[in-house]
Image: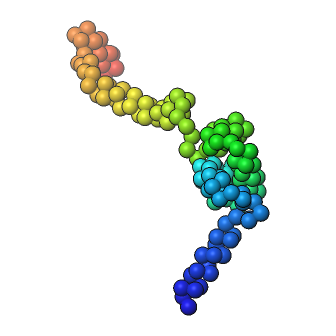
Amino acid sequence: MKKLLAILAAVFCLAAASDPSERLADPAQEARARAIFAEVRCLVCQNESIDDSQAELASDLRRLVRDQIKAGKSDSQVKTYLTDRYGEFVLLKPSFSWGNAALWGAPFLVVGLGVWLLSRNLRTPRPSAELSEEEAARLADLADDDQT
């Protein structure tokens, strides 16, 4: 009985995952679309893929990806289409670019620069705090003036 309930729950979860009318007729194309869904960010939820999101925009993006695949576009062409239209933020794992490298590397560079400056300042000798003879004499004169 428990096994039957577990199987029914799994079937209901699969049925709720996506609307059958949205699915592509070709299973290979649908599998490609689902793989792309996992790599595309929901622009409303921002921390979910469009495969996991229930937002209306995610549904529109799923439909758009399916239309592109149905039109015979490759996976990279579909991703290029999405990034041209929505920007690179739409990808959960953006491609490497020097701008992204600078964005990710800047905090490490700033921390490294701070450590270097701190170590440089700690190593440099400080000037001595002793007074020269002229300064000592002037200080003594000022002290004598205050006592009188």
Q: Which residue is drawn at the image coordinates 59% and 49% (left, top)?
A: 39
- The residue nearer to you, when weighing 66 against 59, is 66
Picture quadrant of residue 118: top left
Quadrant containing the C terminus is top left
- The residue nearer to you, when weighing 35 against 99, is 35
Q: Position of residue 88 (x, y in %)?
A: 63, 38
Q: Which residue is drawn at the image coordinates 27% and 22% (left, top)?
A: 124
Q: Which residue is drawn at the image coordinates 63% and 55% (left, top)?
A: 28
Q: How many marks?
A: 0
- The residue nearer to you, when weighing 110 against 81, is 81
In the displayed structure, 26 sits above or below 73; it is below
In the displayed structure, 72 sits above or below 146; it is below
Q: Position of residue 98 (x, y in %)?
A: 52, 28
- The residue nearer to you, when weighing 145 against 74, is 74
Q: Position of residue 45 (x, y in %)?
A: 67, 54
Q: Position of residue 110 (x, y in %)?
A: 44, 31
